[in-house]
Image (cartoon, helix red, strand yellow):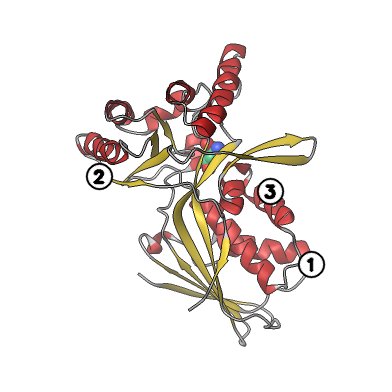
Amino acid sequence: MRCWLIIRFLKGKTVVSVFSIIVPATSANVGPGFDCLGTALTLYNEFKFIPLEESRVFINVTGPEAEKVSTDENNLLYQAFMEFYRYLKQKPPSVKIEIKLGIPLARGLGSSATAILGGLLGANILAGKPLSRKQLMELAIAIEGHPDNVVPALLGGCQLTATNDMRKEVCDIPWHQEVIPVIAIPDFELSTSEARKVLPTQVGHQDAIFNTAHLGLLLRGLETGNHDWLEAALQDKLHQPFRKSLIKGYDNVYSAAVSAGAYGMVISGAGPTLLALTDTLHSEGVEIAMAKAWQQQGIKAVTHSLQVDTQGARNIVQV
Ligand code: HSE
């Protein structure tokens, strides 16, 4: 389905030729890393920028679920694009933006983060790259509200973000190549705001200690591929126990994934996609088991065995 809307602007100066940016999907939290850890995955949204001579910006969306994406001022990419020019105190240029969706919407795979980064990076290129990657990252975090999707989507890899006063410290987390992320994407949506509403405002000391220990173990487990550490490390007490009731069939899919050889399974971001970690030998079986368990609950799910994207958001050669 193709959606078109024309947004009028004052005429800008066109100096850049056509270019495209791809931005990877992300899986935030990875169990105990709530709101601070996330990994980029080899699944992408693509944003093509075609500078125009006319005084207009067009937004066009194609791909699965394109009809669900607004093409007016409510479009998140458009809002990030405009935020960039507000920040620079400049008028936005005229451009046609084609959004090609490859990441399902509202499934906990960072589709919003890709839109924010697509808007900011595209605007930065059109403006002659006045902002550094770090400045773009800070703007993206301010728009998204938490770093665990936008940081890995921008930088690639698995990224841990911590705050030091007002500054963000970002740490690249090594991910062993034998640790395979398997995702199962159900055919229903769950909004992040709904999934955040069920969280308690405070947690107990014991639960905080539990997550501190498990996050530390997870980081070393991801680096070394140590099976025992990964089996223990994916547990969490800060968000998953409260959210799993929003995801029909969660316990069944969990049991199926672990029986098929996964180290464990977590909610990807705010859900409803579920992320299992396994090894190359078991990944196909884990995919089949997760899809089957959901099917038995009357839910269709698409599964993928992916890799960690190591490059992050990038400008690709235009043909
Ligand atoms: N850390 C966030 C959450 C990610 O779990 O709510 C959602 O995009």
**Which circle's residue, 2 or 1, is located before the other in the chain?**
1
Residue at 45%, 23% in the rendered image: 241
Q: Which element is circle 2 on?
A: loop
- The residue where tag 3 is placed is 142
- The residue where tag 1 is placed is 89
Residue at 64%, 44% in the rendered image: 145
Residue at 46%, 41% in the rendered image: 177
Nearer the observer, 117 or 264 = 264
Q: Is residue 242 left or right of residue 49?
A: left
- Answer yes or no: disc 2 within 8 Å of ligand 1: no
Nearer the observer, 220 or 316 = 220
| Residue 42 in view | yes
Residue 41: image x %, image y %? 47, 48
Q: Is residue 221 left or right of residue 119?
A: left
- Answer yes or no: disc 3 within 8 Å of ligand 1: no
Rounded to the nearest angstrom, the CA distance separating label 1 from label 3 is 17 Å
Nearer the observer, 12 or 33 = 33
**Which circle's residue, 1 or 3, is located before the other in the chain?**
1
| Residue 272 in view | no
For residue 249, above or below residue 81:
above
Type of the residue with mark 3: Ala
Q: Which element is circle 3 on?
A: helix
Type of the residue with mark 1: Lys
